[in-house]
Image (cartoon, rainbow, N blue to C red):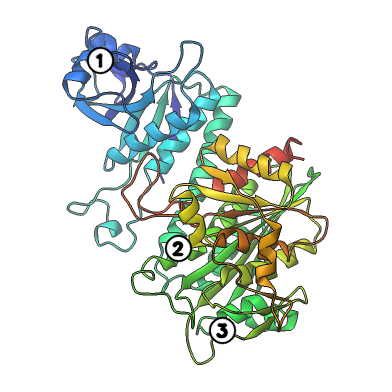
Amino acid sequence: MTALTLSTAAAPGLRADAIVIGVAKGAKGPVVAPGAETVDKAYDGRLAGVLETLGASGAEGEVTKLPAPAGFKTPLVVAVGLGAEPDKNSGFAPEALRKAAGAAARTLAGAKKAAFALPLTDSADAGAIGEGALLGAYSFDAYKENGKDPKAKNGKAPLAEVSLLGGKPRDKAYKAAVERATAVAEELNRARDLINTPPNDLNPEAFAAVAEAAAKEHGIKVQVLDVKALEKGGYGGILGVGVGSAAGPRLVKLSYTSSKAKKHLAFVGKGITYDSGGISLKPAGHNETMKCDMSGAAAVFAAVVSAARLGLEVNVTGWLALAENMPSGTATRPGDVLHMYSGKTVEVLNTDAEGRLVLADALWAASAEKPDAIVDVATLTGAMMLALGNRTFGIMANDDAFRSAVHEAAEEVGEPAWPMPLPEHLRKGMDSPTADIANMGERMGGGLVAGLFLREFVGEGITWAHLDIAGPAFNEGGPFGYTPKGGTGTAVRTLVRLAELTAAGDLG
C-alpha cells in the first residue's frame, strides 16, 4: 500500500522521483495553481507558458510531464489539471483535488516517491489530496506474472510514497486527516481487491473467511451463518438463491461497538459472488463481469472496518448476504415460492432478480436489532444504470429527510448519487396469486420496483435507505481521476461519512 506523509520541505531540495503541481484552466490559458510557487519561480515565472506550449490547458485529469528546472534534486515535474480556476474568494473543491491527485498517482506507477505540491490550505485539503492519491495509486495485479514481483520486466508497482508538501506533520488536524485518508483508502482498496478477485477464488465461504480475519485484526465481533445455520434460522431468501451452487451461501454479521456510542447504524450488502442469472440465465455478453455482483457487500465490509480503525463513536453493524447464483438440478426455478426469514412468502418469477431475495433476509435480521437507521447497498438493477448511467448511484428511502441526508453525504465525499422515488402505484405489480409478494413487478421503473420490494422487509418504524450502485460499482472503461478500471469500491466513503455524521450527532 502506498505510504502517505506530510512534509515541510522546500521543493528544490527534496529528493523524490517527481514533484506534482496543479494547473487550472483560466480564462486566457493554463494557470499555475497555489502550492507550486517555488517551482514556477525556478522557471522564471514562465511555467504557465511552458505548459501551454506543451499542450496543457488545465482541464480536469490532464497530465503533462516536463523536466524539473535546474537546481532541483527531483528530475521530473508532473503538472495535473484541476479544472476551472475558482473564484478569488474560494479555493479548489475537495473533489477537484482528489481527482487531480488520483490522476497524478496513477501516472507515477513504478516511482518510489512523489512530492505533491497541490493547493493545500488546511487539513481538509490534505485529506482530500491524500485520499485521491492513495486511491489513484491502486492497481490489481495479483493474477499477473509481473504482479508477483514488482521488479519483474515491464512490471510497475504502485507509487510507493506520497509526500504532501505544505503539510504540518505536528498539527493534530493534519495528522488526523492523513490517518483518516489512509484508513478509508486502504479499506476501500481492499473492497476493490475483493470485487476484482475471480469468482473461482472468491465464493461465499472465502469471502466470509476474509471478513473473519479482518474482524479479528480490528477488534470487530463476527458471526458467520453457514448453510446449516441458515436452514435452522429459516433464511429462505439466501438459501433459495444459493441452493443451485456447489458453494453454499453465508450470512456474515460484523459488529463494531463503541463504549461512547449513542446511535446504532446497520449496513446491509448484497454479496452475490457470481451471478449467472440462475435458471433465468443471463444472455451471452452479460456474464463476464458478474464477479462484481458482491460490490455492495464489499462496500459494507470496508465501511465497518473503516469505522473500527477510525474509532468512531457509533455502533455499526454490517450484514453481508453472500451467495452464488448458479443453474443446476437443485436451483430455484421460476414459479417456486420461498419462505423468507421475515415469515413472508415470495413467488420467484425471475431467478435473475436474486439480489433482492438475499437482501430481504438480511434486512429483516438487521431490523430485529432495532438500529436507528439501516442502509443497504447493492448492484441491484440494470434499470438504474439506464436511468442514471455508469457513474451515479440511486438513493431510495422510506424517509425523505434521510434520503436527502444520504445524498448530501455522498456528494460531500465525491460519490455521484441521485435521489429516486418509491411510487406507491408500482407496488401492485408485485402482487402474487400464490404468495405474499412476487420478486418481479412492472418492467418500466424496475429499479424503483426493486426498492419497493426491499421496503417490505424493513422493520416497522425503522428509517431505511437503499443504494443501487449497479452503474458505478464496476468500471468497464478506462481509468479516470482516482477511479481505476474494474472494481471501484463505490459507496464505501458514503457509508463511512454517514457513520461519522451519526457519531457527531449530525444525522437525525
Marking on residue 48: 1
Label 3 sits on residue: 334
Please tell me in which quadrant of the rendered image residue 456 appears. Answer: bottom right
Q: Position of residue 356 (x, y in %)?
A: 61, 68
Quarter of the image where the C terminus is located: top right
Residue furthest out toward the bottom: 329
> Is the residue marked by circle 1 packed among few (<14), some (14-19), or many (20+) residues within 10 Å?
many
Mark 2 and mark 1 lie on one chain; the one further toward the N terminus is 1
Please tell me in which quadrant of the rendered image residue 108 appears. Answer: top left
Q: Position of residue 130 (x, y in %)?
A: 46, 33
* Three-letter code, disc 2: Cys
Helix, strand or loop at mark 1: helix
What residue is shown at x 51% (from left), y 81% (from top)?
Answer: 247
Quick check: 148 above or below 227? Answer: above
Q: Position of residue 4 (x, y in %)?
A: 44, 35
Distance from label 2 to label 3 (Cα)?
24 Å
Quick check: 479 above or below 506? Answer: below
In this rendered view, identify the residue nearer to me: 309 or 37.
Answer: 37
Q: Is residue 491 visible in the rendered structure shown here? A: no
What residue is shown at x 46% (from left), y 61% (from top)?
Answer: 194
Distance from label 2 to label 1 (Cα)?
43 Å
Mark 3 and mark 1 lie on one chain; the one further toward the N terminus is 1
Quick check: 201 above or below 298? Answer: below
Mark 2 and mark 3 lie on one chain; the one further toward the N terminus is 2
Helix, strand or loop at mark 2: helix
Mark 2 or 3: in front is: 3
Q: Position of residue 457 (x, y in %)?
A: 73, 66
